[in-house]
Image (cartoon, helix red, strand yellow):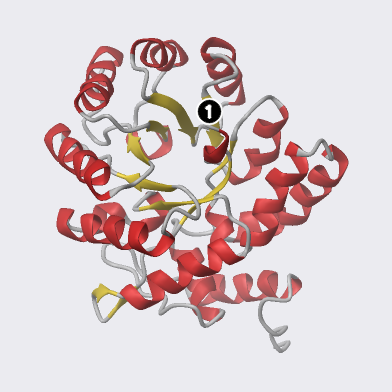
Amino acid sequence: MSAMRGSLVPVVTPFRKGQLDDSRFVDLIEWQIDSGSHGVVVAGTTGEPSALTLEEREHLIELAVRTVRRRVPVIAGTGTTNHAETLRLTQFAKRIGADAALVVVPYYTRPTQEGLYRHFRGIADAVDLPVFIYNIPGRTAVNLEPQTIARLARDCRNIIGVKEANKDFEHVNRVIHLCGPNFLVYSGIELLCFPILAIGGAGHVSATANILPREVARLYDLAAGGQWDAARDLHYHLLPMNEALFVETNPVPVKTALGLMGRIDPEVRLPLAPMSPDNVERLKHVMASYGLVPQPARA
């Protein structure tokens, strides 16, 4: 599973006048591959999956697979709060040639641990495709406990890892300890990318890689090469950008930044709204410090 390690970029979903912007989506993927990203994630949180129809999600997965052409892994975000819909999307991802599925803990319904176990096992048993669990309690209102993750890893050969968007670092330590070194644990929290690598993580799924793909990929490469001092320095170099991209709900700042860079129209779908003018100015100043846009004029 070495090919599944590294910086897996959760690519944004570009819109133009309310419709999917296929050409910009393809351009983003090509830029990511050229910049050294180790894989792409389609329709993860940063891709606004809850604002997409099932047909749009399937279209994006298929377009990503056709664009990538096996150069890097394609991980399809197939999770929803509905078991049957999750099964449909995961079966589609398998059929179309995705390398793995990213299945989020069902949101809003707040299942028990037993319900979560049965949900993930049902998907894994039904579709012969590598599955990453996506644990993001800040958005789902329920935490997939380490013991449940370990149970799934033990009982389902194709559940190969977890994306942990969990700020509880003790939890992440327990997951790695219980599941063992062959279970792939990814950071889904930007400020924990380096720390999780340091305790045996497999990589990161960082929204920041949409803006600084080369640097975020290099963070993993440095750690994998044992250059821990350089990796730590890069971790702190990325910190201002990591913070600026979350001053409002992800992916609004990320899309705003890509718009400022001329890579997409920064359009989001309701109920998300455009970034506030004050926060846009703040973002511009941070981006300027990385040389991504000109330094804004002083008021």
Determine the residue located farthest toward the right in the rendered image. 229
Residue 152, given in percent of the width and then of the height, sits at 36, 15
Packing grade of label 1 (10 A; few <14, some 14-19, many >=20) is many
Residue 170, given in percent of the width and then of the height, sits at 60, 19
Residue type indicated by callout 1: Leu
Asked whether, in this view, residue 102 is left or right of residue 237, the answer is left
Label 1 sits on a secondary structure element that is: strand
Q: Is residue 280 above or below residue 131?
A: below
Residue 142, given in percent of the width and then of the height, sits at 35, 26
Quarter of the image containing the C terminus? bottom right
Q: Which residue lies under the disc numbered 1? A: 184
Determine the residue located farthest toward the left in the rendered image. 84
Q: Is residue 11 above or below residue 176?
A: below
Give the residue at x 68% y 33%: 197
Give the residue at x 43% y 60%: 68
**Along the line of sight, which residue is nearer the eye, 225 or 135?**
225
**Along the line of sight, which residue is nearer the eye, 30 or 19?**
30
Give the residue at x 38% y 24%: 159
Q: Is residue 277 above or below residue 146?
A: below
Give the residue at x 51% y 14%: 179
